[in-house]
Amino acid sequence: MEYTWASIVAVLVVVAVELLWLKTGLLRKLTFYVSWAIILFFMVLVDGWLTKLSAPIVLYNEQENSGIRFPWDIPVEDYLFGFALITLTMLLWERWAQRHPDDEASRRTTGPLIRRR
């Protein structure tokens, strides 16, 4: 069950990186969860098509995962691994925006800056 454990560890590491090092506050924002819901919708569509047991494009060694598939034959480990990858990317992006508030890309991410003169 290597894929299962690797996926679980990846999620724990990403959450620990946020809570102990980056401290962006992203995991407490509603926008993070709305973004994740949108990502999850498309992830289910694409991953379901790629992993369907009737005509799989991506094959898994069933000894390396839990064998739990939901929905459309998607291994549950794919959700954990996807969460870790996407969340880490979002955390790093948020950290960049917080450290570089004058950068144009940061303003698009964090909203307009209010400056007092």
Image (cartoon, rainbow, N blue to C red):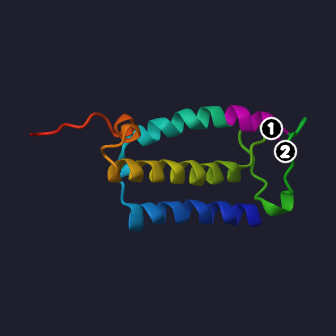
Label 1: state its secondary structure: helix
Residue named by callout 1 = 50
Quadrant where the image shows the N terminus: bottom right
Quadrant where the image shows the C terminus: top left
Q: Nearer the viewer, residue 69 or 46?
A: 46
- Start-end of magenta stretch: 44-52
Label 2: state its secondary structure: loop
Q: Are marks 1 and 2 in contact (CB under 8 Å)?
A: yes
Q: CA distance from mark 1 to mark 2?
A: 6 Å
Q: Where is residue 107, by image quadrant?
A: top left
Residue 63 sits above or below residue 29 on the image: below
Query: Would residue 26 appear left or right of 68 to someone viewing this image?
Result: left
Main SS category, magenta section: helix
| Residue 116 is a magenta residue | no
Q: Residue at x 61, y 32 (%)?
A: 41
Residue named by callout 2 = 58
Q: Residue at x 65, y 37 (%)?
A: 43
Toward the right, the furthest residue is: 55
Q: Nearer the viewer, residue 72 or 89?
A: 89
